[in-house]
Image (cartoon, rainbow, N blue to C red):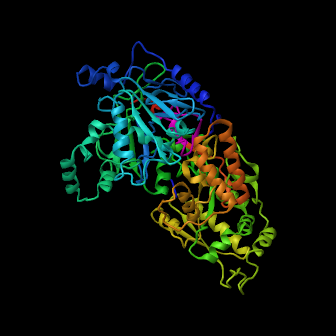
């Protein structure tokens, strides 16, 4: 079952959450007069656009710029890797509710306010009165209902069902539309993390589907038209056609149709797929203003240039062709070249607080198709031996230019869920102790000094490395490979592309994979655990254990592999996993801490280092960029710092 920063607040009691809502809503202000971009004012004067007061909601979302009131005009330049434009860390983060810029609280966004009942079984949301899509059509609960009924819970579009946080103890949320602006989600049991989950990157799904436009692509509303469009596309599978034509979550189709209404600060003017360069323009109906009553965004155009190669992206950023560098190239090995070219590239450094808790984690396959191999992986002494044989400090000094400290799979020290035992155990480089533990598992060696399995065959250990996602992992694993060879492990690397990685990861004959340790700051570890994948603290490379858990939730569940009863500690972690979303306050925190203690006892995943010293480079022509941003996924940083308040210093 594989479902795919700095935060100061824990999940509080429901009353505290409600007070946050009241506080955030009270900060909204009223304006006697609104101001707009000159090009929009010209359209109003020409009678081609309604006056600004008619385009904004009754209570616009008020955003305080990081430094000062900006100026209108200019072009925001970005690079596009050719994959997913809907990269919510860089564009498209317009949820019902969202994280504040500093990550300390959930704040209103498209929803103006909300209430939570006493036992957290019902969440009632109020949309902003007068809210409009980018084509001027009202945004109402009809759009929420369309998304829920025709997309999120539609089996032909989402055969796996709605996103996991819409379920509590197997019960799907009930959507109740109260009036044009008010709706609720409810369950029989408490959903103690629903508001936070709606604030994550996955929450964007709720506000992407304008019913008045998308009905034409829905067979319930337009059966003949859909059949004709599918025939023209040569597609007989509705779900696949919908994904390519309309999109469901993070698909490029969601932004490829210039006629499709959106809620974002910039909107497309033509299809972008396949283009070398494309531009989105200012949304005249964008629902946010600054503290001086100026409609946002300040910048008139947001343009992307196709640059699928990381080296090309680096060179173009050095030349000033990207105004806000992305994670892919803002890596420690590139810091020196960025530093040396600051004047030429006309950019500056800002600090990036990484919400990841590990640069790279090793995940053995505990459901290996070879039972001998699986038995070795399941032996804790084997995992301890591998960990002690890793010279982490050399890796940190060589690959990450000294940035970071040895660290296992554990929440970051800044998180209130930090667990020192989990974070630091077996991180010292001690080849003698490593050999002692490995000797308990595979004491015999062949003539070349490599360890032998219990059946007498040479033990080989192949690790799959995704070089497209993180090129630095190849360098890391080459160093670790040498360490393991010194301990008698015939270690090998299978370096693959992004396209092949998922196939390798799901192959039962794969020994191990590596991935990043994500969502490690503040309350993110608990959100990640409660998202039904255990936050990685229950090993993902144990399909048979997850199948067992599926059967516990539903005795009739169909599983891809035969269930295998996991160890008692894992069983308890699964139990906690199912309980976390239905608890609140101190009980919820205690369960999370117990989950982490059990993870420390099991030690099923081997970490490398704590990410530190992260950065971004930002054009000197780009204003209102904070000196420090948070990066991550469940907190889709840096988007919460409000790109719509950035401005070009010299205007047009």
Residue 341 painted magenta? no
Q: Where is residue 189, by image quadrant?
A: top right
* Location of residue 596 in the rendering, given as x and y in whole percent from the top left corner: 69, 50
Residue 624 painted magenta? yes
* Location of residue 22 in the rendering, given as x and y in whole percent from the top left corner: 54, 22
Q: Residue at x 52, y 41 (%)?
A: 197
Q: Residue at x 28, y 41 (%)?
A: 214
Regarding residue 340, the answer to whether it shows in the image is no
Magenta segment range? 617-643
Q: Where is residue 231, by image quadrant?
A: bottom left
215 to 114, vertically: above or below: below
107 to 609, vertically: above or below: above
614 to 65, vertically: above or below: below
Give the total number of marks visible in the rendering: 0
Q: Where is residue 438, by image quadrant?
A: bottom right
Q: Residue at x 36, y 32 (%)?
A: 141
**Viewer-side residue, 596 vs 301:** 596
Regarding residue 46, the answer to whether it shows in the image is yes
Q: Residue at x 79, y 65 (%)?
A: 430
Position of the C terminus, as image quadrant, is: top left
């Amino acid at each position: 079952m594989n479902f795919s920063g700095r935060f100061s607040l824990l999940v509080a009691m429901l009353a505290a959450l409600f007070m946050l809502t009241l506080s955030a809503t009270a900060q909204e202000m009223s304006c006697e007069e609104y101001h707009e971009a000159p090009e929009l004012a010209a359209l109003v004067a020409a009678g081609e656009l309604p006056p600004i007061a008619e385009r904004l909601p009754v209570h616009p979302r008020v955003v305080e710029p990081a430094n000062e009131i900006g100026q209108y005009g200019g072009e925001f330049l970005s690079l596009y890797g050719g994959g997913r434009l809907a990269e919510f860390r860089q564009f498209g983060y317009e949820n019902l509710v969202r994280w504040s810029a500093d990550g300390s609280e959930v704040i209103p966004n498209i929803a103006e306010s909300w209430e939570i009942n006493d036992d957290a079984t019902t969440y009632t949301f109020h949309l902003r009165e007068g809210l409009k899509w980018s084509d001027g059509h009202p945004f109402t609960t009809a759009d929420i209902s369309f998304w829920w009924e025709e997309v999120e819970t539609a089996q032909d579009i989402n055969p796996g069902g709605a996103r996991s946080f819409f379920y509590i103890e197997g019960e799907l949320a009930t959507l109740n539309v109260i009036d044009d602006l008010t709706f609720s989600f409810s369950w029989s049991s408490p959903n103690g993390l629903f508001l936070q989950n709606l604030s994550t990157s996955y929450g964007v799904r709720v506000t992407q589907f304008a019913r008045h436009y998308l009905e034409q692509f829905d067979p319930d509303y337009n059966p003949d038209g859909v059949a004709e469009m599918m025939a023209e596309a040569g597609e007989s599978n509705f779900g696949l056609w919908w994904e390519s034509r309309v999109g469901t979550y993070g698909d490029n189709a969601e932004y490829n149709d210039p006629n499709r209404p959106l809620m974002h600060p910039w909107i497309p003017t033509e299809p972008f797929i396949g283009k070398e360069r494309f531009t989105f323009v200012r949304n005249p109906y964008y629902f946010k203003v600054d503290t001086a009553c100026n409609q946002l965004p300040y910048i008139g155009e947001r343009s992307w240039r196709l640059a699928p190669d990381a080296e090309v992206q680096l060179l173009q950023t050095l030349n000033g062709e990207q105004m806000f560098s992305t994670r892919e190239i803002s890596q420690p090995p590139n810091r020196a070249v960025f530093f040396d070219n600051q004047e030429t590239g006309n950019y500056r450094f800002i600090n990036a607080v990484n919400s990841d808790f590990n640069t790279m984690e090793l995940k053995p396959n505990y459901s290996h198709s070879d039972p001998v191999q699986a038995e070795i992986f399941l032996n804790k002494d084997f995992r301890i031996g591998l960990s002690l044989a890793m010279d982490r400090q050399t890796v940190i000094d060589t690959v990450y230019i000294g940035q970071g400290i040895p660290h296992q799979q554990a929440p970051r020290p800044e998180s209130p869920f930090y667990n020192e035992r989990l974070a630091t155990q077996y991180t010292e480089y001690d080849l003698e102790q490593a050999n002692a533990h490995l000797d308990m598992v595979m004491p015999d060696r062949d003539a070349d000094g490599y360890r032998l399995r219990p059946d007498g065959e040479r033990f080989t250990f192949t690790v799959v490395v995704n070089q497209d996602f993180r090129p630095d992992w190849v360098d890391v694993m080459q160093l670790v490979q040498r360490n393991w060879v010194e301990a008698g492990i015939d270690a090998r690397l299978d370096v693959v592309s992004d396209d092949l990685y998922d196939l390798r990861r799901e192959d039962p004959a794969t020994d191990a994979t590596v991935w990043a340790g994500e969502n490690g700051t503040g309350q993110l570890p608990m959100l990640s655990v409660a998202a039904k994948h255990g936050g990685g603290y229950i090993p993902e490379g144990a399909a048979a254990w997850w199948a067992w858990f599926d059967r516990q939730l539903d005795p009739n569940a169909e599983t891809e592999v035969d269930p295998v009863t996991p160890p008692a500690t894992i069983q308890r972690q699964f139990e906690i996993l199912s309980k976390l979303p239905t608890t609140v306050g101190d009980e919820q925190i205690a369960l999370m801490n117990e989950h982490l203690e059990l993870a420390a006892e099991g030690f099923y995943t081997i970490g490398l280092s704590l990410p530190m010293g992260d950065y971004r480079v930002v054009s000197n022509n780009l204003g209102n960029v904070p000196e420090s941003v948070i990066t991550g996924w469940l907190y889709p940083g840096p988007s919460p710092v409000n790109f719509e308040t950035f401005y070009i210093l010299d205007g047009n």
